[in-house]
Amino acid sequence: MKILEGQVAIVTGGAQGIGYAIAEELALAGASVAIFDLSLNPAQSAASALVAHGIAARGYAVDVSNSKLVDETFAQVVADFGHLDIVVNNAGVSFVGPHIKDVTDEVWNTSVGVMQSGVFYCMRAASRYFLPQRSGSVVNISSIRGLTSSPGRIAYSATKAAVIMMTRVAAGEWAPYGVRANAIAPGVQRTPMWDKDVKLGVIDEEYIVSVTPAGRLGDPSEVGKLAVYLCSDAAAYINGTCITIDGGLTTVPIEGSITRPDSGPGSIS
Ligand SMILES: NC(=O)c1ccc[n+]([C@@H]2O[C@H](COP(=O)([O-])OP(=O)(O)OC[C@H]3O[C@@H](n4cnc5c(N)ncnc54)[C@H](O)[C@@H]3O)[C@@H](O)[C@H]2O)c1
């Protein structure tokens, strides 16, 4: 029997990148998967690809910064799959570059809307199913940017740090009900978000690889395998923690220069 056999998982931002890799590892571990993403077509395509692993999967168009839509779609997932056991809050946006004086309201509000409020809305919705059933696991995707500072990342780093603290608050509240919350702080992973920032010239990939002790970027599937572990019974006593997966990047002081100090106005992804 596979370790997550029969479980149902929601993965936000699951149409591509780390979210898709997590969804695929959950599927390989036997879980059925609901993919939440901004547009229906990419979410459904991702879900169709996962069905090849012999599980049920569906895509849903959900902007996680819309609390009403989040609540409605959680209810729809439970109606479609019968129950809910795992929620991975992964959806994210990247605006790399502008220093504080140049950060627009749009950049700030979108970042907080997706990566802090969106995580909160999904945690709240999850808890309304998990607490009464006295089981469930939430995994929140933070970032090494939530642990170490970097110029040009005020909104991103603030939300990623908030995710770690929201995870800890939830773990303390939920543990008596048998519900767990943990966070993952990835280092640099090759995904569409990463490739876009490299292409825009706001991140120097060669430099990052040269200062990463492991000597390479991370593979999103490695984050996926960690998420599977955290959701499994093998991690039953792990609650409220944040696990860094960065090839040792945060062990070397130089990594603070990950964002070029002279970088431009930034990107939206
Ligand atoms: N790539 C990295 O190096 C890296 C490192 C550390 C942390 N992360 C985090 O991992 C997560 C995934 O990053 P990625 O690199 O795969 O990014 P990505 O841009 O490749 O994928 C992000 C996904 O989230 C979706 N999304 C964006 N806004 C949304 C919203 N409001 N509602 C629902 N879905 C939304 C996008 O459509 C996309 O499918 C993000 O939270 C990111 O901050 C990434």
Image: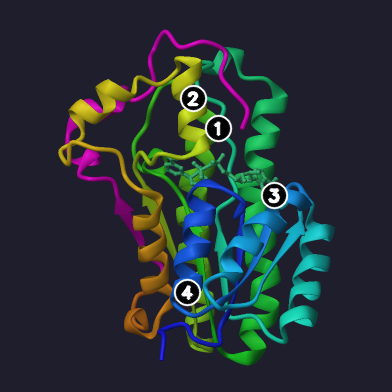
Question: What residue is rendered at 46% in x and 33% in y?
Answer: 194
Disc nearer the start of the sequence (4/3): 3
Name the quadrant containing residue 212: top left
What residue appears at the point 67 percent right and 68 percent down from the top-left corner?
124
Q: Amino acid at mark 4?
A: Gly
According to the picture, the residue beneath numbered tag 3 turns out to be: 42
Give the numbered dot on residue 242. none
Check disc 2: other Cα within 10 Å, few if <14, some if 14-19, many if 20+: many
For marks 1 and 3, give the CA distance.
19 Å
- Mark 4 burial class by Cα count in 10 Å: few <14, some 14-19, many 20+: some
Residue where numbered disc 2 is placed: 197
Asked whether the viewer can see residue 251, the reply is: yes
Q: Quadrant of residue 73?
A: bottom right
Q: Is mark 1 within 8 Å of ligand 1?
A: yes
How far separated are the C-alphas under marks 1 and 2?
Answer: 8 Å
Q: Which residue is mark 1?
A: 94
